[in-house]
């Protein structure tokens, strides 16, 4: 009778109640091998995480592993530990994190060659060369406040130094098609783990990232889980960008897991950008993260639009004329397309959007001010005003809908232009308060991050606003994230929201389940607060738990079993 071996396997399935399943095989297989197994009468992929001496129940009841798919060691012990941490924190299954990180196996390139094993089950021919961390004490992360050109020079210097030492550097970025990433790829031996490309390209990129040689590994969320044996430095580009959180579930936030990976692999972590994440800001204040500032700039000029009849203020118009006379280039950022209609209250700062056939309000719904008025704004409206004022000037519209437009003497742009390397003599924020009154509890942070990055693109800076005395606008004028957080975080602490509490957005698959889930949540001992929220296209629950309290296993199991989409700390 052939000897049987027993394995703990993580399975690629939506099942969330159990993380590990036991299978048997007549072959001795290494840990982290990808195999094909029978799960609920379906053939699915699984990953071996451990070899068991003996199962806890009758071996005859166990299913046999169908076949070996790949034994290229696409994961290692640290990757596995990071995946378990992510699964626990983001209330999702272990298998979903692992197979969400791994590329689709290109089976014609997969390694299934005969292996020679030691008694411990480790391949002699394919033993992982794991480098142990030489540092024993904890390494304090660093937040570097710098504009994009300063960050590029910093990355160049750091990467060059580490590659000379024969080490690997991991660079995590929210967008992989920016000029900064493209230049670094040209300068250094690099592997880009991108969500774009064919199955073969993505699979080969992952395998190259596991090679034991000096190289720069660039990616977004997935790259965190690559088994890098010689990693010595983790760089997080534009740490505060809302795009750092992936769109597909589980919505893992890069900076949060980068801190954990840095701790597990005992390597230096540098978070860079103009705005830190709220959680990072609190850690800077608690001196858990070092802070270094190399970004230096004078305060922006604030233009009050309350008395203006159009979206372009007189002071702004004069500044544009001066820039044109000096043969310099200007850019006007307005993160809204078309000819949108908007109502604004100069007394309290309320803003809202109007439908095509909707009339302006007589009184502000917040403070009852009669000063509330309607305005037309958006890139099309701004373009119309500028062409009327400067009929002979080359004006270009740069957004994702006009990729080939290029740069003009005056460029009007959305956040799409932040990908460009070009710097401008004058950067103008068309309207600072767009969207501030939307239901999204994180919209203020998202607008502040975009606005600060947009303003940093110009040597001189102008902010236009209908509510110049609003705390948000004043913080933006001073280019000061500390001033912004002093205003914004007070509100969030009172409402028991992230980053003081662990917050969840729960959207049921069926709207009729909303009330049932709401009543169940209110009975939980772990709960701090729960709200029913409704936006234009969806209804959902927003609830919070205390970070310090470990979640009750039964409550966690109930949440995982819901037919609903759960997002954790949704910045």
Image: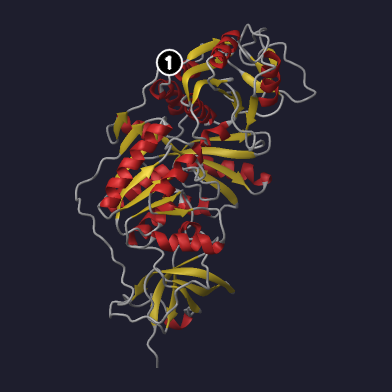
In-front residue for pair 408/309: 408
* Residue at figure coordinates x 59%, y 35% from the top left: 532
Residue 233 vertical placement versus 476 (above, below): below
Q: Is mark 1 on a helix, strand or loop?
A: loop
224 in relation to 158, above or below: below
Please tell me in which quadrant of the rendered image residue 111 appears. Answer: bottom left
Label 1 neighbourhood size at 10 Å, few (<14), some (14-19), many (20+)?
some
Residue most extreme to the bottom: 1
> Hey, which residue is sitting farthest right in the picture?
357
Image location of residue 548, percent across then percent down: 35, 40
Q: Return the residue nearer the eye: 10 or 172.
A: 172
Quarter in which the N terminus is drawn: bottom left
Colouring rule applied to residues: secondary structure
Residue 496 makes an appearance in the image = yes
Relative to 346, is 71 above or below?
below
Q: Name the residue nearer the viewer: 431 or 318.
A: 318
Q: Where is residue 492 in the image (x, y as percent from the top left)?
A: 46, 28
Could you tell me residue 498's position as x and y percent?
45, 35
Is there any visible trace of residue 569 in the rendered image?
no
When the figure is inspected, residue 454 is found, relative to residue 251, above or below; the finding is: above
Residue 219: horizontal and vertical position, in percent?
45, 50
How many circles with numbers are drawn on the protein?
A: 1
Check disc 1 and report the residue beneath it.
Answer: 299
Q: In which quarter of the image is residue 281?
A: top left
């Amino acid at each position: 009778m052939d000897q049987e071996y027993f394995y703990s396997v993580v399975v690629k399935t939506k099942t969330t109640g159990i993380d590990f399943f036991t299978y048997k095989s007549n072959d001795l297989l290494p840990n982290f091998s990808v195999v094909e197994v029978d799960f609920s009468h379906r053939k699915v992929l699984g990953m071996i995480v451990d070899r068991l001496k003996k199962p806890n129940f009758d071996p005859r009841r166990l299913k046999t592993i169908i076949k070996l798919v790949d034994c290229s060691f696409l994961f290692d012990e640290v990757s596995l530990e990071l995946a378990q941490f992510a699964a626990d924190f983001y209330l999702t299954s272990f298998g979903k994190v692992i197979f969400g990180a791994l590329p689709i196996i290109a089976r014609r390139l997969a390694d299934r060659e005969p292996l020679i094993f030691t008694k411990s089950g480790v391949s002699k021919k394919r033993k992982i060369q794991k480098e142990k961390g030489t540092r024993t004490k904890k390494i304090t992360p660093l937040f570097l406040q710098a504009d994009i050109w300063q960050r590029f020079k910093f990355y160049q210097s750091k990467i060059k130094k580490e590659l000379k030492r024969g080490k690997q550097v991991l660079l995590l970025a929210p967008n992989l098609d920016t000029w900064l990433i493209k230049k670094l790829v040209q300068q250094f031996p690099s592997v880009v783990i991108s969500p774009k490309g064919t199955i073969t390209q993505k699979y080969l990129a992952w395998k190259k990232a596991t090679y034991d040689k000096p190289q720069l590994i660039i990616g977004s969320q997935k790259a965190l889980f690559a088994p890098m044996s010689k990693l010595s430095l983790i760089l997080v580009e534009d740490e505060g960008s809302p795009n750092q959180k992936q769109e597909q579930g589980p919505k893992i936030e890069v900076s949060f897991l980068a801190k954990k990976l840095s701790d597990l692999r005992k390597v230096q972590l540098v978070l860079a950008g103009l705005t830190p994440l709220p959680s990072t800001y609190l850690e800077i204040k608690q001196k858990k993260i070092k802070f270094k500032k190399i970004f230096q700039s004078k305060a922006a000029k604030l233009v009050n639009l309350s008395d203006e009849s159009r979206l372009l203020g007189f002071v702004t118009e004069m500044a544009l004329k001066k820039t044109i006379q000096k043969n310099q280039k200007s850019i006007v950022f307005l993160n809204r397309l078309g000819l949108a209609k908007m109502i604004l209250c100069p007394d309290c700062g309320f803003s809202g959007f109007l439908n095509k056939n909707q009339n302006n309000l007589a009184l502000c719904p917040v403070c009852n001010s009669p000063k509330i008025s309607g305005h037309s704004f958006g890139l099309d409206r701004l373009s119309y005003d500028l062409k009327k004022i400067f009929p002979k000037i080359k004006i270009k519209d740069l957004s994702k809908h006009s990729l080939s437009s290029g740069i003009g003497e005056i460029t009007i742009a959305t956040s799409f232009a932040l990908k460009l390397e070009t710097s401008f003599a004058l950067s103008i924020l068309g309207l600072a308060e767009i969207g501030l009154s939307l239901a999204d509890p994180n919209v203020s942070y998202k607008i502040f991050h975009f606005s600060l990055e947009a303003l940093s693109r110009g040597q001189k800076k102008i902010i236009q606003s209908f509510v110049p005395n609003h705390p948000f606008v004043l913080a933006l004028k001073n280019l000061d994230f500390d001033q912004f957080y002093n205003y914004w975080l007070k509100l969030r602490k009172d409402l028991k929201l992230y980053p003081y509490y662990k917050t969840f957005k729960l959207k049921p698959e069926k709207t009729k389940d909303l009330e049932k889930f709401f009543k169940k949540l209110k009975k939980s001992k772990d709960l701090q607060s729960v709200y029913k929220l409704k936006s234009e296209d969806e209804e959902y629950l927003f609830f919070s738990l205390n970070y310090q309290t470990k979640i009750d296993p039964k409550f966690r199991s109930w949440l995982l079993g819901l037919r609903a989409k759960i997002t954790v700390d949704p910045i």
